[in-house]
Image (cartoon, rainbow, N blue to C red):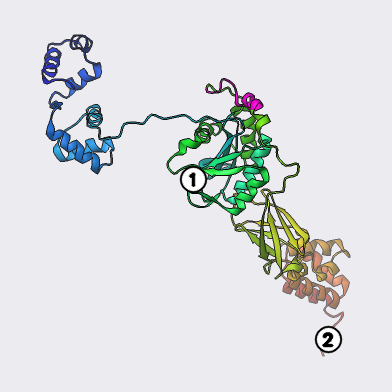
Amino acid sequence: MIPDEKRQAILLLARQGVKVRDICRKMDVSRNTVRNIIRHPELKPVHEHDAQLLIWVRDAFNACRGNAVRIAEVIKENHDLDLPYSTLTRIIREQQLRKPPQRSGTYTYEPGAEMQHDTSPHRILIGDTKVIAQCASLVLAYSRKVYIQYYPNFTRFECKVFLDDAMRFMDGACLRCMIDNTCVVLASGCGADAVITPEMALFARIYGFSFRAHSIGNPNRKAHVERTFDYVERNFLAGRTFHDWDDLNRQARAWCEQVANSKPKRSLGMSPEKAYVMEKPHLLVLPAVLPPVYHSVDRTVDIEAYISLDTNRYSVPEHLIGKVVMVHKYLARVVVFFQHKQVADHPRIIGKRNKKKTDPSHHKPLAYKRAYQGACSEEQLLLGHNDTLDAYVRSMKKRVHGRGVYRMRRLLNMQRSYPDAPFMAAVEQAQKYGMYDLARLESMILKLVAGDIFKLGDD
């Protein structure tokens, strides 16, 4: 707070031509303060014990929900007082309008005691399309070893796929997995009262760990995994391009191995990979045989011999139309079974909608497609007897739509109805002049055969 006397002294020195630097030394104030006083000499100083100002700030603080920038704007609009931001924040601190920050504690973790899991949406450019991808992360709390993967959306199926892949990457599991209060894992409740869904509880039992949710509003309980997302956005995503989802996850895994887990951390005094060596003996050993992670659903084969899954369609043998089949959705494959026998296996379509995967062996050509393939029978009868006639047929076919069945049939009838010599002479002349009107061609043939077939005498 600059007293009014000092403000007047600064303005007087400035009028006398004293430099800003010299004024700062004499008055013991900063250069920015001197410049502001010189630029705005008309502003009135805010006195430290102005009771009316304190009332204005307190009322505006409640109305603006503690937003200091908005408080200054409201005071300017309502009371025509340009209150400096630093003065406003000092008043808020002195009046204790905002609760002072509380001292934070620290969490200590024993080796193999806890791993932390969470997801975060990231905007990523895949190919030429910008998408919102869900970044799933798992961090070992003791060694800080991290593993990340990306998914178009994150349901219980993707959660199980990721955790299975992450624990294979870690080659073990911790006793508990700390999560937030997500409905992907929880059935009801929150924090200590959270109820884990039976599906996810059974999945965790296979690997020997258990889920635990932190209390609402306490994300610091899993701060290691929360901090990872900022590191991923600033380091992994910066300056990288991705062709597809597979390329994105390949690069994410390589980044975990080569960068995130190899870089020394100041809090550890070593890299997570070296700390992992000390934690590895304390991790739960994974079962010798792990069951595959898939989602099983029943589907009815539609009239086009396709089944629908996640808005996309996959072909099945056409003799199963109307039948109910069992579909197993894996991360990268879609497998279809009928009466316990595999009938289809397709690569899974990821990150797209309303697409098709068709196996040509599943569907025979439709009858109308088989009937209209290749040259018609009339064209086949015309070709192969004379080079001139062959050239005329091919040239005429280029000038009609489709296979030209009508024209071929009419030309074949002319060949069968008239003698070969006049017919070929007329065809040769028509080919020479590029004439493909069959009515004119027939009139030319009739002129050439006049008197030979028909009796055109005077009587």
Task: Return the mark for residue 238.
Answer: none
Q: Position of residue 128 (x, y in %)?
A: 56, 43
Which segment is the magenta one?
267-278
Which image quarter holds the C terminus?
bottom right
* Front one among 415 and 42: 42
Please indicate, yes or no, whether residue 399 appears anywhere in the rendered image: no
Residue 5 quadrant:
top left
Q: Amino acid at mark 2?
A: Gly
Q: Position of residue 149 (x, y in %)?
A: 60, 40
Task: Return the mark for residue 457.
Answer: 2
Give whichever of discs 2 and 1 has the lower sequence position.
1
Q: Residue tagged by mark 1?
A: 192
Q: Position of residue 297 (x, y in %)?
A: 66, 60
**Element type at mark 1:** helix
Residue located 49% across and 45% down the image: 192
Q: CA distance from mark 2 to mark 1?
A: 117 Å
Residue located 51% across and 36% down the image: 222
